[in-house]
Every structure is written in C-alpha cells, then in structure tokens.
Image (spheres, grey):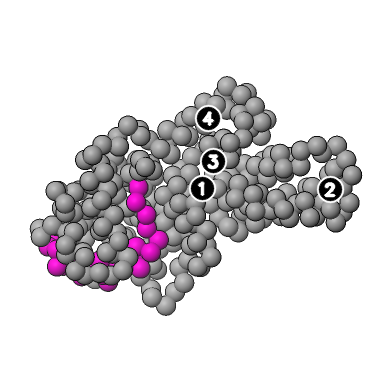
C-alpha cells in the first residue's frame, strides 16, 4: 500500500527518468516539465492500490501526454522560433546555460531530426530505441497494433539515422574538415578558419540568413573567415549533421532548426558552403545523424 508521502517519494525517484522521456519526445524543457507535472496529477487522482509496476505505468502516462502535446503542436505547426539576426546579438541570452547542457546531453542534431518525425513515429522511436520499451507496450500508447508500431519505429529510425552504410573513408574525411571549420568558428579562431577554408572558398546564403549589410555571396578565405568570426555566436548553437547526403552543419537554438549549412569539401579544405534559412527549403532538406 502506498501512503501519500511514500507515493510522492516514489514519484520523485522517477522524476528524472520521466523528464528524460518527455524531453526527447517534446524537445522543450518547459513542455517536458509540464508533461511530468501532469503525470503527477494523474497519479495523485489514480487508485494506486492495483499498481504493480509504477515505473511502467508512469512511463505510459507521460508518453500519452507527450503524444497529445505533439499532435496539438502538429495541428498548429509553427514556423522556426527565432530570427537568425537575433543570434548575432552579444548582449542577448539566446539559450540559457542549463538548457544548453541539457541539449548537449541529448544531442542537438538528434533533437533537430526528431522534430521532423510525426507524433506516433517520434513516440515509438524514443520509447523503443532510446529507452528499450518493448513494442507490445508501446502499441497501446500510439493506438496501433504491435506490427504497425514496429513499422512506425522502423520508419522513424530510417529518417533519424539515414543510410548508415554511407560511413565511408571519404565521408569520415569530409566530417573531419567540417568539424575543424565548426570548431574554429565557435572560438572565433581566425587562423584556424584560414587553415580550413580553401583560398577561393565561396559562401552563399539566403537573404534571411544574413544581418543587414552582408552580401548573399562572399568570396575568398580572408573575407569568409572574417565574416565567420563576426557571426561566431551562431556556431554556439550549431552541430554536425548529414545534410543532403554530406557532412554539414545545423544551427538549432533551443534544439529547433533555424539554419542549415550544406558544405562542399575539396581535399582537406572547405571549398564552398551555402546557408539555408528559408523555412520551406529547410523542411524539404534531407537531414539525418552522421554515422558514428
């Protein structure tokens, strides 16, 4: 028998797990907090005498709450949450430190890709692939049969991970170059940028991706490197991903895709890259996780 104090203690011992599940499903710390709080309220109103598996029951409840929230979000599908120009303001806190740590613990690129899944796909993938919940327990949550739930998760897995067979030596070499570019951009390392940019590098960008005064095309390593240092705050919310089949970069404040960089590598240098900001183009752009 659970006493009220005992029930509260049991719930608190599971709060971290429930928040981890909810955050991966929703991609928002605040919404995850709301989902966990709603789970507690439902537990408090439930007859707990017949609960033999409290962790399983709570995981099911929080998952159903998250699924409802995802469906509501899809119905009012919002555009990207921010203006790229706001990322360049040194006086503005674009992402609180605690949220940045939480995002890094999950993976910024993973959050971007999960955000592209349908509600049922996301719930099935998160529960099975990230938390090892059996499909026969997931099926009632998403309202599908077990075989259909397996297909949901399989489809989601393909969209998250893409073709992992593409982990070739060439891809690894390209990834090394893009990683070096992003690392130098994050620290504002001008010499590092000049070392990784081809002398004749070309940067193109959607107008919406640029602050006033910057041309949509920039040419030459010195020009592109200086611009990258100027816009270095953007790289603080960036991560590597497979963008349109090649190693690239996603800029995702709060884990939500705002910009994507498609990057052409020649030898051990960045030969060209394009910054995409148009919401319609971003939605169509294939983005998956880079192979390990």
Tell me the CA gap for discs 2 and 1. 32 Å
Which image quarter: residue 202?
A: bottom left
Q: Position of residue 225 (x, y in %)?
A: 20, 66
Q: Which residue is mark 3?
A: 130
Q: Position of residue 283 (x, y in %)?
A: 39, 44
- Classify mark 2: residues with Cα within 10 Å, few (<14), some (14-19) or many (20+): few
Q: Position of residue 93 (x, y in %)?
A: 46, 72
Q: Contact (CB < 8 A) between labels 2 and 3?
A: no
Q: Which residue is mark 1?
A: 77
Sequence-wise, the earlier of marks 3 and 1 is 1
Sequence-wise, the earlier of marks 1 and 4 is 1
Q: Which residue is mark 4?
A: 152
Up the image or down, 248 lies above or below 138; here it is below
* Part of the protein shown in magenta: 219-241
Q: Which residue is mark 2?
A: 45
Residue drawn at 23 percent across, 52 percent down? 177
Residue drawn at 56 percent across, 46 percent down? 25
């Amino acid at each position: 028998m659970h006493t009220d104090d005992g029930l509260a203690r049991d719930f608190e011992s599971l709060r971290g797990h429930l928040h981890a599940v909810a955050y991966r499903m929703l991609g928002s710390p605040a919404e995850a907090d709301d989902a966990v709080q709603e789970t507690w309220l439902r537990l408090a109103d439930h007859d707990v005498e017949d609960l033999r598996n409290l962790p399983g029951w709570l995981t099911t409840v929080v998952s159903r709450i998250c699924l409802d929230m995802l469906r509501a979000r899809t119905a009012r599908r919002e555009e990207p949450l921010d203006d790229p120009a706001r990322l360049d303001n040194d006086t503005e806190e674009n992402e609180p430190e605690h949220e940045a740590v939480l995002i890094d613990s999950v993976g910024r690129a993973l959050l971007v890709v999960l955000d592209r899944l349908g509600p049922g796909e996301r719930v099935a993938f998160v529960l099975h692939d990230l938390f090892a919940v059996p499909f026969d327990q997931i099926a009632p949550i998403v309202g599908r049969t077990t075989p259909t739930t397996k297909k949901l998760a399989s489809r989601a897995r393909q969209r998250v991970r893409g073709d992992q067979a593409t982990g070739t030596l060439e891809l690894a070499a390209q990834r090394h170059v893009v990683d070096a570019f992003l690392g130098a951009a994050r620290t504002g390392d001008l010499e590092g940028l000049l070392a990784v940019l081809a002398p004749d590098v070309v940067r193109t960008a959607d107008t919406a991706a640029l602050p006033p005064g910057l041309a949509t095309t920039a040419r030459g390593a010195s020009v592109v490197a200086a611009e990258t240092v100027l816009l270095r705050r953007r790289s603080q919310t960036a991560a590597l991903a497979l963008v349109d089949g090649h190693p690239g970069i996603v800029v995702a404040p709060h884990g939500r895709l705002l910009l994507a960089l498609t990057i052409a590598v020649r030898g051990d240098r960045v030969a060209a890259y394009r910054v995409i900001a148009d919401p319609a183009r971003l939605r169509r752009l294939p983005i998956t996780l880079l192979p390990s």
